[in-house]
Amino acid sequence: MRIRIVDTFTDRPFTGNPAGVLLLDSGAFADDEQLQRIAMELNLSETAFAHPLPPGGDADWALRWFTPTTEVDMCGHATLATAHVLHTTRAASGTVRFATRCGILTATAHPEGTVTLDFPTAPLTPQTAPAGLAVALGAEPLSVHDTGPHIGDLVVELADEATVRGLTPDLASLSRLSRRGIIATAAAEDPSRGYDFVSRGFFPRVGIDEDPVTGSAHTALAPFWSARFGRDELTGLQASARPGLVRTSLRGDRTLLTGNAVTVIDGELLTAP
């Protein structure tokens, strides 16, 4: 069984968010314990497992995502990585439909090499900042929004880009404040640099201290910043140590996420699940 590691939301190796991708030949997944062990072994923020589905159905591939510690309901960058592998290996062309825990997701490859994901827009609900959030994050929130059941994060608006970039949060305390993680965000200091807003994502509750580039978070960031800027087409920079760009396009209850991807490792799993 081949394992590929793909850097996503970037066009250069060793930047963006790496994801493991395993395309399974069988029409079923291995048992959950084995999938989790593989994800733990790779120790990336997510590892994607996919297998083909019979023709004529609502989806072409079944897709699941695992962090080193748990399965998640939605993952953008590992979906982008899977679509990239399917297209670069010619296992698929055009638009691919994935059956997932959060419904049918699609990924469309473009001639210039980018991939566009079609995801559900996160429902944003304003809420009072949880007790201890400012201390744990190390910055005072301007606003806090819940992102709904599939994502389970809090979007926390901060004063400016420099504040987001300078965060050194108390991760143990953050892990107790949301169902999945905290997305800190602010408007770009200088939009002429090619992005409209910045973010960072912290997910210690699911085994990821800081995620380099979180595609699913942008299904919440897109409606948040589109409402502020009055534009449906935006670009977000996730300002981690491995930064990446996500182009967002708000389409009502759907959000399109577009980015590049690069395969950096292509290997073989010697112990089959």
Image: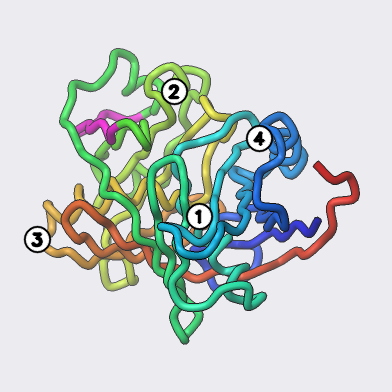
Q: Amino acid at mark 3?
A: Gly
Q: At numbered mark 3, what does the secondary structure look like: helix, strand or loop?
A: loop
Relative horizontal placement of residue 109, taking residue 90 as reference (left or right): left
The span from disc 3 to disc 4 (Cα, nearest Å) is 38 Å
The residue labelled by disc 2 is 174
The span from disc 2 to disc 3 (Cα, nearest Å) is 31 Å
Contact, CB < 8 Å: mark 3 with mark 4? no
- Among the two numbered marks 4 and 2 on one chain, the one whose residue lies closer to the N terminus: 4
The residue labelled by disc 1 is 77
Q: Amino acid at mark 4?
A: Pro
The span from disc 4 to disc 1 (Cα, nearest Å) is 15 Å
Q: Position of residue 221 (x, y in %)?
A: 28, 49
Q: Position of residue 238 (x, y in %)?
A: 42, 54
The residue under the point 28% across, 17% down is 130
* Whether residue 245 is situated above or below residue 203 in the rendered picture: below
Please state the extent of the stretch shown in magenta in the rendering.
Answer: 139-148
The residue labelled by disc 3 is 230
Q: Which mark is residue 68?
A: 4
Write down the quadrant of residue 209 in the picture: top right
The quadrant of the rendering that contains the N terminus is bottom right
The foreground one among 35 and 75 is: 35
Contact, CB < 8 Å: mark 4 with mark 2? no
The span from disc 3 to disc 1 (Cα, nearest Å) is 26 Å
* Whether residue 202 is situated above or below residue 228 in the rendered picture: above
Dominant secondary-structure state across the stretch colored magenta = loop
Contact, CB < 8 Å: mark 2 with mark 1? no
The residue under the point 70% across, 55% down is 24
